Image (tube, rainbow, N blue to C red):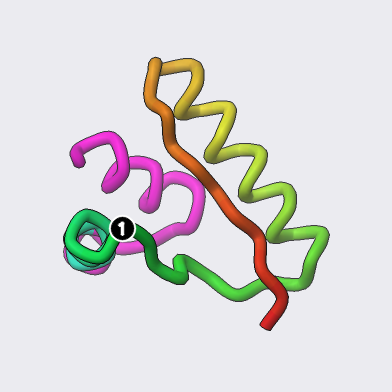
Amino acid sequence: MEFVVESLKAIFNYSEDRAKDLCIKIHEEGSAVVAVFPYEIAEQKGVEATLLARKHGFPLQVKLEPT
């Protein structure tokens, strides 16, 4: 969970408290809407999160969905 919190802070600029709240929601519900961006930005953020997770050995999944 610590990795997810740090990723939310680094990639999506969340505060510590907001990142922790979102991490708990993801943990309890299995997923959550992390942010809403134009497609190109969402795609870039998804790639950043996935690469960071793989680099640290985590199987984090990022899904892009239209709003």
Q: Looking at the rendering, in which quadrant would you find the C terminus?
A: bottom right
Q: Which residue is mark 1?
A: 30
* Residue 12 placement (x, y as % from top left): 48, 57
Q: Please indicate whether residue 57 sits to the left or right of residue 38 in the image.
A: left
Look at label 1 and name its amino acid.
Gly
* Residue 47 placement (x, y as % from top left): 66, 39
Residue 13 figure quarter: bottom left
Give above or below for 55 relative to 14. above
* Residue 60 placement (x, y as % from top left): 43, 37
Q: Which of the two residues, 36 or 29, is positioned nearer the viewer here? A: 29
- Residue 53 forms part of the magenta stretch: no
- Classify mark 1: helix, strand or loop: loop
Q: Residue at x 39, y 42 (%)?
A: 7
* Residue 34 placement (x, y as % from top left): 45, 66
Q: Residue at x 31, y 43 (%)?
A: 4
Looking at this view, name the residue that lies furthest to the front. 30
Q: Which of the two residues, 9 or 52, is positioned nearer the viewer here? A: 52
Magenta stretch in the rendered image: 1-19
